[in-house]
Every structure is written in structure tokens, then in C-alpha cells.
Amino acid sequence: MRASFSLAVLLLAVAGCSATTLDYSECDTNAQCRAQFGFGFVCGGGGLCEEAAASARCNSRFPEDLFAFPDRHKQTVVFGNLMDRSLATHRARELSARLAVKQATEEGGLDLRDVGIVFCTIAEDPEFGDFLTREEAAADSADYLIHTLGVPAIIGPAASDDVQYVFQIHRDTGTLFISPSATSPALTELDVTEPTDAMPGMLWRTAPPDSLQGAAIAYDMRAPGLGRATAVQTVAVVHHTGAYGAALANVFATEFQADGGQATLLPFENSGEMSEKIGQAAIGDFDEVLFVSSQTTDAIAFMDSAAELPGFDAKGIFLTDAAANPDLLMLADAARFPQVRGTRQAPRDETRDLVYASFIAAYASEYSEDVTQFSFTANAYDAAWLLSYGASWSLFQEGDITGAGMARGLRKLSAGNEIETRATTWNQVVESFRSGTGVDISGASGDLDYDPNTEETSGDIETWRIEGGAIVGIETWPPAGG
């Protein structure tokens, strides 16, 4: 760093005057300014350190004083988060991640360093004045988190299409991304195809890929007795052409047709095409209509259209995990709800699973709300803990906290002493990683047993329906003994 100099600024007050000294340092990089002045400082256009410009989208954080007292947070380990705050489900996922970060700090932090997080909303909202799509808002907010604030890792986005868009833009920045809910199989091939400790993948998730969900949907439709007397024979698959929709539709169609069914794919790219394909599904000779999109708003629009079309009167409707949340229940036309079935990652049983029950109780205590009504919240909680674990490995084994070092730490979470993901076990992980020993993590969302060859986890899939204004589980797949 080049020489620094001081500028004395005289401040006049009513009762007298005092002098305050402000230090301005010449700089070449944002990292230099963060090291000297604290979190939220950047190297300005004039080659001097200055406070970073605020982002209207990234205006929520923990700790609350993260930007107000930058010098206090020189050593704070800060992550980023990308969610659509216009959706109640995404807000609950934000709060779940915040809970984990808060617990890590309250339990002593990371080697006396606090753990923090900056939350950015990627909602399409004209009030921001940027007129960005969700994908564009996600990429723009990720750019702010990475290049301006210097975070080593980001939780999100939630939807597979958004993840694909953001990761392709920022994959060479050295930033670790972990999504709690992006389930497209296409994302597996987007990252390192043969990951190793030397070259780990930089795109992770705490939800299993849709290769499992597609097979579960096909099984449900071909198994008589799950809400129908005979197996479904013909299905119209109205699906978005993005990473989530196309991949899941193809997995389903392959499995369904291998078992004797007939699937007709009706892809769409935009809202106009979606309306057209919904109309085709309505007038076609189909037993069931499967709708697949990573956006809950699309599922809401589908249900609204289906309610108005008589062609859906005698058809079953099947939705996927992106629709399994209160936003659909609150915002969609409920006329067709009795005809709906769907799939999602099977939630853990809070009466039998202590780590899941601990998460539910901690969330209720912190926010006075029942978190079980929201999808992928346990996954978001786990994702934040995994980033803290990864940061611990990177710090102790590599001497610095980087995205790649954190990713190598994530590869150490599936073998060793079993440890449950909750506040009271944080320091057990820290001490294991300090000694270079791996652990076997059991999360609030599942066991999180990552395959080292794919860096993917697995889990059971649950079939659900809507009863009494709530999403109710029907059956878990794979079936017992299957």
C-alpha cells in the first residue's frame, strides 16, 4: 500500500469546537481498504479508500451495525444472500440463514471473529428504478456482494434458472455459491465435473437434484391407489425451457414412458407461450397435467388459468417443489386445489428428529413464527451453517478465508464423527477442522451426505396435496422396501 496521510477536519459545535482526524489511504484494491478501515470500504475512483456506495437491493444485514461501525468488523466473516423478498417463502429462507449466522456468532464466532451476512433481494420491483428481471437482479446483486463487499460465498439464488444465470457470469470470481432449493440436474454439469480436494466445485446445494423428483412423480402417476383407481396413462407436461423446467420434464418423461405411460411435452419461454400451452393442455385428451417451472409466480399463473378453463374439470393437476409454499396457497385461485398433487423434498419428522426440532424451536423463539409452513427453510439454515463450517476449514488449514478453501471444507462434511447442525455443536466442528479432521454432518434438512465424485446430496421425496388451505404430505418416495 502506498503512503497514507491525515486530514484534520475542524468541526464547530454550539458549545465549542473539537477536532476529528480522518485518515485517507491511497489504494489499488478494495481489499486493501477493507483491511485498513473495515467492512464496507472500497478503493474509490480517485485512488483513495472510501465507504462503498449503498445498494438499495442489499439493505438488510446481520449484525445490524455491519456498515455503521466498519472498524469493528475488520475481521468479521461476511457472506452474501440472494432471495426474492417479495415472496413470503423467500423471506423465511432469509431468516433461516440469519438464524444460523447469529447462532454461530453467539457461540463464539470463528476464532474470535463474528460471522455476518448481507441480504439482497432479487425481486422484480419497479420501485428500485433499475427495471431488472429476477435473473439480472440476481447477477447485479452478486456483483455488488463479490466485487464491492468482497464476500467469499453466497447463499442462493433459490431458483435453478437464476442460479444458472448468476453462476455462469460469476464462476471465475472464486466465489462459492450454495443454493438451498435449486434442484435442476443441469446444474451438476455446470460446475467442475470431476471435483477433487485440489479443484473442488464452487456450486453447491443443500437440496437433492431433480433426478429423484422426476422419478418420484412418474412413480406416483403410475401407481394406482394414490388418489385414483387406475394408473395415469397420458400426461401433458407444461414446462419452462430453463434449467429447472426442461431437465425435470425430461427426467419425468423418460421414467413415465419407460413404465408404459405417454407424455407430451409443451415447453414455454415466456408468459404468452405459457398461456398458449396451458390452453393446449386443457383441450387435449390428457388424464393429468404436470406443470414445471422454477418460479412460484408461474405456478400461481397456471392455477389461475386452470381455474377458468373447463378443459381442466376432469384432469388431475401435478405441481412440483417450487409450488409447495404458502405463496401459492395465498395468491393462486383455489378453485382447482382439490385436483392438485405435487412433490417436494420430504421434510424431517420434528417429533423424531432432534436437529430438525431444534431448528423449528429456535426459529419460533427468534421470530415468533412457525417455519414448517415454508419450503426449503431448513435447507437455507443448513446452507448458512455449511458456509461457516467451510470458512473454518479454510481459515485453519489454509490461513485465509476464500471461496475455494471453503469448498474444500465442504468436502470434509460427510465422513468422520457424526455432528448435528445446530448452535451447540458449532465449536465441535471448529475444533475438528482446526485439527484437520473431517466430520459427518446431519442437517436440519437431512443427512447431507455429499458424494465426493459429484458433490451432490440425496434425500427422500414426498408427494403432497392441498387440504384445508395447507400442504399435506401423502407418501414418501422411494417407497418402503423400494
Image: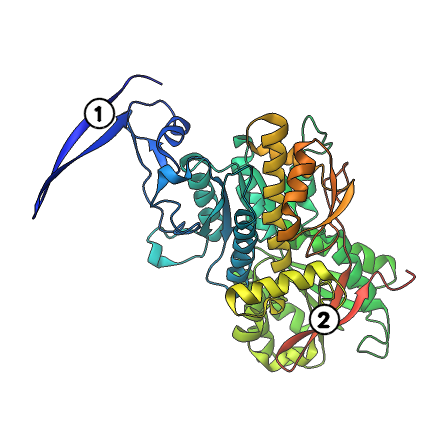
Residue 314: x and y in percent read: 72, 80
| Residue found at the very far right of the displayed protein | 481
Q: Is residue 104 above or below residue 304?
A: above
167 lies left or right of 26: right
Name the kind of residue labelled 1 in the image.
Ser
Query: Where does label 2 land, which residue?
Result: 464
336 lies left or right of 81: right
Mark 1 touching mark 2, by CB under 8 A? Answer: no
Q: Is residue 65 above or below residue 390?
A: below
Residue 474: x and y in percent read: 77, 73
Q: Is residue 40 visible?
A: no
| Residue found at the very far front of the displayed protein | 15
Mark in front: 1 vs 2: 1
All told, the count of numbered labels is 2
SS under mark 2: strand
What distance separates the C-alpha of mark 1 from that of mark 2? 65 Å
Query: Of the residues under marks 1 and 2, which one precedes in the sequence?
Result: 1
**What color scheme is it?**
rainbow
Residue at the image position 62 percent from the left and 38 percent from the top? 390
Residue at the image position 86 percent from the left and 57 percent from the top? 258
Name the kind of residue labelled 2 in the image.
Trp
289 lies left or right of 275: right
Query: Where does label 1 land, which residue?
Result: 6
Name the one closer to the observer, 115 or 301. Answer: 115
Q: Residue 124 is drawn in which quadrant?
A: bottom left
Could you tell me which quadrant the N terminus lies in? top left
Residue 280: x and y in percent read: 64, 68
Name the one closer to the observer, 18 or 99. Answer: 18
